[in-house]
Amino acid sequence: MAYEVHKQAMAVICTRIKALSLPGFSREQIVVRRWPWDTKADGTVNYHHGITIHPEREIEAPGTNERDDIGYGIGVTMIVPADHASTANVDKVPMARREIRAEFHHQKLTGVSLNDSIHLNCTVEHNAINTPRDGHRYEISSQIIRFWMREARG
């Protein structure tokens, strides 16, 4: 069931981030994927340049005596090539982080439904992502949009 909730949430988050028209990121660069990179059989890594929306683990928090609060994590990872000669690409990532945070933090994630559940709100936090070895060639930053549902105990 968790992955179905993640799929719904990733689609909604992708649509809302595309609507932000973030400077430096085209709509085509904002995608839902399993990871922000692919590792080939020979060990080479292909990075997705843009914004990748991907699932992160869910966590449980104290709920009520009848329901559990479950926080479903959705990673939002931004990758742009590092331009070590200038700061042109350095500014894209913090600006996008700020706008994404403002869009989702303490807001409801409408469009996600789960039987017999109550949607609470979203929090946005830093995501420490373990980048592949050659990740220093890119500006990489990740956040987790964690949306909270109060779910009936099964």
Image (cartoon, rainbow, N blue to C red):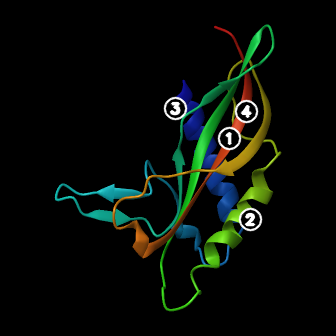
Q: Residue at x 69, y 20 (%)?
A: 115
Q: Residue at x 50, y 52 (%)?
A: 129
Q: Which residue is mark 1?
A: 146
Q: Marks 4 and 2: which is nearer the front?
A: 2
Q: Give the image quarter of residue 56.
A: top right
Badge 3 vs badge 1, beta-carbon distance below 8 Å: no
Question: In the visual, does 147 lie left or right of 77?
Answer: right
Mark 2 secondary-structure assignment:
helix
Crowd rating for badge 2 (residues with CA inside 10 Å; few <14, some 14–19, many 20+)? few
Q: Residue at x 67, y 60 (%)?
A: 17
Q: Which residue is mark 4?
A: 148
Q: Which residue is mark 3?
A: 3
Place of residue 80 in the rendered image (x, y in percent of width and height, measured from the top left) = 50, 74
Question: In the visual, does 9 lie left or right of 139?
Answer: right
> For this rendering, which residue is in front, 127 or 46?
127
Q: CA distance from mark 3 to mark 1?
A: 14 Å
Q: Is residue 116 above or below residue 83?
A: above
Which quadrant of the rendered structure holds the N terminus? top right
Q: Earlier in the sequence, mark 1 or mark 2?
A: 2
